[in-house]
Image (cartoon, rainbow, N blue to C red):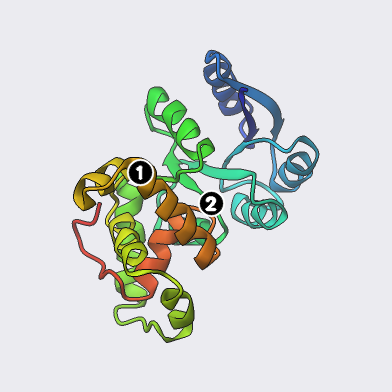
Amino acid sequence: MNIRVLIVDDDTLVRAGLRMMIESQSDLEVVGEADNGADAVTLARSLTPDIVLMDIRMPGTDGLAATGLITDMSDEIKVMILTTFDLDEYVFEAVRSGASGFLLKRTRPEDLLAGIRTVASGDALLSPSVTRRLMDEFARTSPARARDSHESKLDSLTAREQQVLVHIGQGMSNREIARQLYVSESTVKTHVKRILMKLGLRDRVHAVVFAYENGLLEPRGDAF
């Protein structure tokens, strides 16, 4: 079954370029386009795409607000922010709004297409430069963030699950975690699913946020 994509950007040429790129792939299809956040929410509701490629700066309802509305509406629709801007406040707010990926428009076409597939598969995606900014935001705003408010959730994790969560926060893939822990990749996938379910998190991006916010990891300049 093809991955169904909704393109949201106020630039007609950008939308046309993205459509051409996506529809050149046999496993991807564009199901709709919107040039503002309000229409994006309406189309997401009616078309139920797998992925929404979302611009940030648009007239009226911007991409961040639209992302929050879409992710609140459905856990099945994944939003990937695609923008020319990589400023800290956009990165942090995009993750807070429920985005599962964040790539810059200067990203190579093959990396963008791979990113769509990555997010559609249930994984999450942040470009290295974006990830560094996200970790910088943690360091700047919450250098000693307490775990108290989420202790009960953390306590719901087994020791192994907490270990896997730390590795997720370090940017490891399932395969890398499996090698680190000497277990199968399918076992790691099971642990990840249970972690997300127990913590009520959408995906790995939000697992990373949770790990840093609750002191399981400390922000580092060379993170990821």
Reply above or below: 182 against 90.
above
Reply above or below: 175 against 130.
above
Q: Give the left or right position of residue 146, taking residue 25 as reference.
A: left
Query: For the residue marked with disc 1, what is the amino acid?
Result: Ser
Q: Nearer the viewer, residue 172 or 86?
A: 172
The residue under label 2 is: 99
Residue 90 visible here: no
Quadrant hosting residue 27: top right
> Which x, y percent locates residue 218?
25, 70
Task: Give the residue drawn at x 27%, y 56%.
Answer: 170
Q: Earlier in the sequence, mark 2 or mark 1?
A: 2
Query: For the residue marked with disc 2, what is the amino acid?
Result: Ala
Q: Secondary structure at mark 2?
A: loop
Task: Give the residue drawn at x 53%, y 36%.
Answer: 120
Q: Nearer the viewer, residue 34 or 219?
A: 219
Q: Nearer the viewer, residue 131 or 27?
A: 27
Q: Give the left or right position of residue 136, taking residue 91 as reference.
A: left
Residue density around tag 2, few if under 14, some if 14–19, many if 20 or more, within 10 Å: many
Reply above or below: 106 against 145.
above
Task: Give the residue drawn at x 46%, y 79%.
Answer: 150
Is label 2 in contact with label 1 (beta carbons under 8 Å)?
A: no
Task: Give the residue drawn at x 51%, y 42%.
Answer: 122
Residue 104 visible here: yes
Q: CA distance from mark 2 to mark 1?
A: 13 Å
Mark on residue 2?
none
> Which x, y percent locates residue 161?
36, 63
The residue under label 1 is: 127
